Amino acid sequence: MSGPLLRVRSINELEGEFRGTTMSGGSFDYACYKAMQFADELRNKLQEQGKDPSGEGWPNPTWPTDVACKLAEIAAFADYVGALMKEAEWLYSGDTGEDTFMCRVHDLESTRGVLRRRSPLTQDAILDMAEGCTLEFHSLLAFARAVERAHGIGA
């Protein structure tokens, strides 16, 4: 095995991360946590590319770089959407007010805005977008170009 697997968080664990010791949300049956769990599971599958977990000769698929990077982007986007969903759920449940909701959504949008940008990316943005990609590259430049191609960015 080439590294530790990411642990998939259960719905109950995800709920606990956000609500602490008091019950919050619930107006949409905690749907936000399903999106976050999907993101965890997708990242785990990306880490397991080409491996045969059962040992029965049925390895997991290995995706081309552009596909793996797009899958990593989808996982990041699912986390982003889950966080937005949580804010909507808490607003409807009366756990936050309108001002807090707008402030938190603005913060989420400003920190996750790289998903909507269609211009050259910074090194940090590339690494954030490629979280979950386990493919090896000979240089950061080759890696950056692959991520930009996967996002339709560049010349």
Image (cartoon, rainbow, N blue to C red):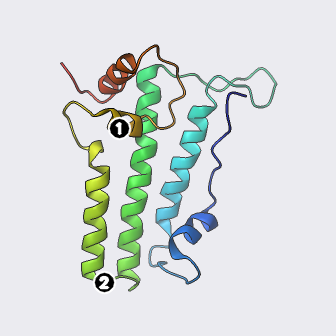
Residue farthest to the top? 138
Tag 2: amino acid = Gly
Q: How many tags in the picture? A: 2
Rendered position, 11 above or below 1: below
Query: In the image, residue 91 lies at what x, y percent?
Result: 35, 79
Q: Secondary structure at mark 1?
A: helix
Q: Secondary structure at mark 2?
A: loop
Rendered position, 95 above or below 82: below
Rendered position, 131 above or below 102: above
Rendered position, 68 above or below 75: above
Q: Residue 59 is drawn in which quadrant?
A: top right
**Residue on which disc 2 sits:** 97
**Residue on which disc 1 sits:** 124
Q: Residues within 10 Å of mark 1 (few under 14, many from 20)?
A: few
Query: In the image, residue 139 lies at what x, y percent?
Result: 42, 16
Q: Residue at x 54, y 82 (%)?
A: 23
How far apart marks 1 and 2 lie (CA) works out to: 33 Å
